């Protein structure tokens, strides 16, 4: 990447962060010109954050890729083999009302995986997870981390849309779980971020409310797992976005993307 491209990349990332921070209800204040011209960020409630907290660290997207040349571990599935095993799945009743299976999207080499709940209408029509309004917010979250959808992996606990966007039912979660497990095994990511109650409870086998699960590191089969709120919830409760941004900053630290 030449200097001009690097500058354009940095500006795009900074813009994405500002969009997210503004969207999140975080107030970005510029200090006056007599000061050191650094930006400070205040959390809702007017409590000043430290300068260190207020700065995002811009990272190269390549930092989020595992070594693409690294061989897969013997005996582990690949994303393709999991998808092939799924076929035109009819293992639960959700197959009756779907337009298409929404398997997952992103890099097979991702170090970071987002797991949501279930496809909605937009996802059912497009075949890609998180493309509706909640998905657009997730994209902003990812870009605010200095990343892109192409460098992470995104999927859901169930791969078919529940009718009228109702919650997935226990038998549906159970039927689809082997596919999610297969995806996570294939990816061998370093961090899993679960979005919302169902993904966290499904992977952790923990019925604790998401309001108490979020923000605390857990582990799923040896992989660090950070539960946080679902972007759809954030659309309804924008005041909670600052908490999610705090969770994502922890993830960035874990991945070495910020100090
Ligand atoms: S939700 Fe999962 S288990 Fe149910 S039909 Fe779709 S792919 Fe199969």
Image (cartoon, rainbow, N blue to C red):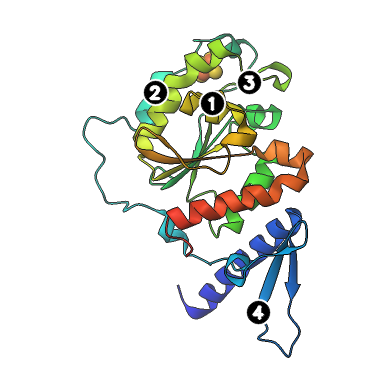
Which of the two discs, 3 and 4, sits closer to the camera? Answer: 4
The alpha-carbon separation of the residues under discs 3 and 2 comes to 18 Å
**Residue 43 image point, x, y percent:** 72, 59
**Mark 3 — residue?**
99
Crowd around label 3: few <14 · some 14–19 · many ≥20 (10 Å): some
Crowd around label 2: few <14 · some 14–19 · many ≥20 (10 Å): few
**Residue 55 image point, x, y percent:** 60, 68
**Mark 4 — residue?**
38
What element does badge 4 sit on? loop
Give me the disc on residue 84. Answer: 2
Query: Quadrant location of residue 209?
Result: top right
Of the image marks 1 and 4, the number of the one nearer the N terminus: 4
**Residue 36 image point, x, y percent:** 65, 86
Visible residue check, residue 53 = yes
Of the image marks 3 and 2, the number of the one nearer the N terminus: 2
Give me the disc on residue 201. Answer: 1
Visible residue check, residue 129 = no
């Amino acid at each position: 990447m030449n200097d001009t491209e690097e500058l354009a990349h940095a500006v795009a990332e900074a813009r994405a962060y500002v969009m997210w921070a503004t969207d999140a209800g975080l107030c970005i204040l510029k200090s006056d010109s007599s000061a050191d011209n650094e930006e400070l960020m205040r959390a809702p409630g007017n409590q000043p954050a430290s300068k260190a907290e207020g700065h995002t660290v811009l990272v190269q997207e390549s930092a989020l890729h595992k070594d693409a040349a690294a061989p897969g571990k013997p005996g582990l599935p690949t994303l393709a083999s999991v998808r092939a095993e799924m076929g035109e799945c009819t293992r639960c009743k959700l197959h009756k009302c779907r337009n298409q299976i929404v398997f997952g999207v992103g890099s097979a080499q991702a170090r970071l995986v987002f797991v949501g709940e279930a496809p909605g209408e937009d996802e059912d029509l497009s075949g890609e997870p998180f493309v509706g309004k909640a998905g657009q917010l997730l994209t902003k979250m990812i870009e605010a981390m200095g990343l892109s959808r192409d460098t992470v992996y995104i999927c859901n606990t169930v791969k078919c849309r529940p009718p009228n966007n109702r919650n997935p039912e226990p038998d549906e979660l159970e039927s689809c779980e082997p596919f999610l497990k297969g995806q996570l095994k294939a990816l061998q990511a370093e961090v899993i971020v679960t979005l919302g109650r169902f993904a966290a409870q499904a992977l952790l086998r923990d019925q604790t409310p998401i309001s108490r699960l979020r923000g605390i590191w857990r582990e799923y089969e040896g992989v660090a797992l950070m539960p946080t709120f679902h972007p759809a919830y954030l659309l309804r409760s924008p005041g909670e976005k600052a908490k999610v941004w705090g969770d994502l900053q922890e993830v960035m630290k874990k991945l070495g993307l910020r100090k």
